[in-house]
C-alpha cells in the first residue's frame, strides 16, 4: 500500500479484536512514530504499550481518576470506565514530555506528538491493523499521567487502540476537498485545470 492509498483509505475502527500487533509490528509502528517531524529533534514523545492484563490495570487507573475527580459518579459509570481499555487487545499511549528551555514552544512539541500518532495510525493501517485514536478525560488527568509513570508536565496526546478489525471500518463521510486558496493571487479555482501552464 503506498502512502496516498494509506491516507485515503484509513478510517477509525472501534470494533477491534485479537490479535494485537506482533512484536515485529510494534517495532514498525514505533519506528513510524519516531519518524515524525520534530522541531529541534527533541524527541519529546513517549510511547507506552499496554496489552494483556495490563489493560485491566489501566482500566482501574481510569476508574479511580474518574472517581477522584467526580466522587458522586455512579458505580455503573465507574465500571464502564474500567472496561474501556478492554475494547482492543492493545493500546499505545502517546505522550509528550515537553523539553523545557529548548527554545521550541510547548505547542510545537505537542504537535510533534500528534504527528507521531498519525504516522502510527497510517503505519498500522498499512499493516492491516485497525486503530482508533481516543482521548477523553483520562488524557487530561494528572492522576492518569502519574499512574502511567509520566513526569509532571507531561501531556497525553492519544490512547491509540489497536487490533484486528472485527468488522469492516465504517468510512467517514466523504471529505469535502479543502477550500484552499492561492494566497496573494486573484481568486481562481483550485486545483488548477490541467491545461494551466
Ligand atoms: C485528538 C483526537 C482525539 C480523538 N478522540 C477521540 C475519542 O475520544 N473518541 C473517539 O471515538 N474518537 C476520537 N478521535 C477519533 C475521531 O473521532 C475520528 O478520527 C474522526 O471521527 C474521523 O474519523 P476517521 O478517523 O474514521 O477518519 C480522536 C481524534 C483525534 C485527532
Image (tube, rainbow, N blue to C red):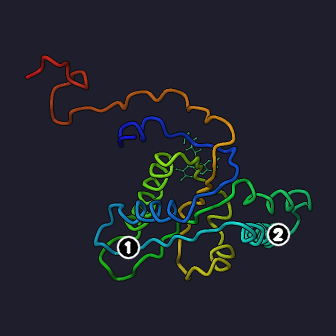
Which quadrant would the C terminus be assigned to in this image? top left
Residue located 46% across and 30% down the image: 175
Q: In which quarter of the image is residue 31?
A: bottom left
Horizontal and vertical percent for residue 66? 78, 66
Q: Is residue 3 above or below residue 197?
A: below
Residue located 72% across and 69% down the image: 58
Left or right of 34 in this view: 134: right
Question: Upstream in the sequence, badge 1 or badge 2?
Answer: 1
Horizontal and vertical percent for residue 89? 69, 58
Residue located 39% across and 66% down the image: 34
Identify the residue at the far left of this view.
197
Residue located 78% across and 68% down the image: 56
Neighbour tally class for label 2: few under 14, some 14-19, many 20 plus, Cα within 10 Å: some
Foreground disc of the pair 1, 2: 1
Neighbour tally class for label 1: few under 14, some 14-19, many 20 plus, Cα within 10 Å: some
Horizontal and vertical percent for residue 47? 52, 70
Horizontal and vertical percent for residue 113? 44, 63
Q: Check residue 67 in the rendering and tell me which mark sits there, or answer none.
A: 2
Q: Name the residue under label 1.
A: 43
- Element assignment for label 1: loop
Amino acid at each position: 500500500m503506498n502512502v496516498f492509498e494509506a491516507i485515503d483509505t484509513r478510517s477509525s475502527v472501534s470494533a477491534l479484536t485479537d490479535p494485537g500487533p506482533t512484536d515485529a509490528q510494534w517495532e514498525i509502528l514505533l519506528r513510524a512514530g519516531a519518524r515524525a517531524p520534530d522541531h529541534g529533534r527533541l524527541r519529546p514523545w513517549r510511547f507506552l504499550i499496554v496489552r494483556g492484563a495490563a489493560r485491566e490495570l489501566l482500566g482501574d487507573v481510569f476508574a479511580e481518576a474518574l472517581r477522584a475527580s467526580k466522587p458522586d459518579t455512579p458505580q455503573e459509570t465507574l465500571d464502564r470506565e474500567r472496561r474501556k481499555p478492554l475494547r482492543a487487545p492493545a493500546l499505545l499511549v502517546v505522550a509528550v514530555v515537553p523539553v523545557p528551555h529548548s527554545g521550541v514552544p510547548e505547542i510545537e512539541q505537542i504537535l510533534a506528538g500528534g504527528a507521531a500518532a498519525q504516522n502510527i495510525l497510517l503505519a498500522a493501517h498499512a499493516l492491516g491493523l485497525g486503530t482508533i485514536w481516543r482521548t477523553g478525560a483520562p488524557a487530561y488527568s494528572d492522576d492518569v499521567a502519574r499512574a502511567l509513570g509520566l513526569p509532571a508536565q507531561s501531556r497525553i496526546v492519544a490512547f491509540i487502540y489497536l487490533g484486528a478489525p472485527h468488522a469492516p471500518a465504517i468510512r467517514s463521510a466523504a471529505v469535502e476537498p479543502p477550500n484552499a486558496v492561492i494566497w496573494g493571487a486573484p481568486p481562481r479555482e483550485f486545483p488548477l485545470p490541467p491545461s494551466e501552464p
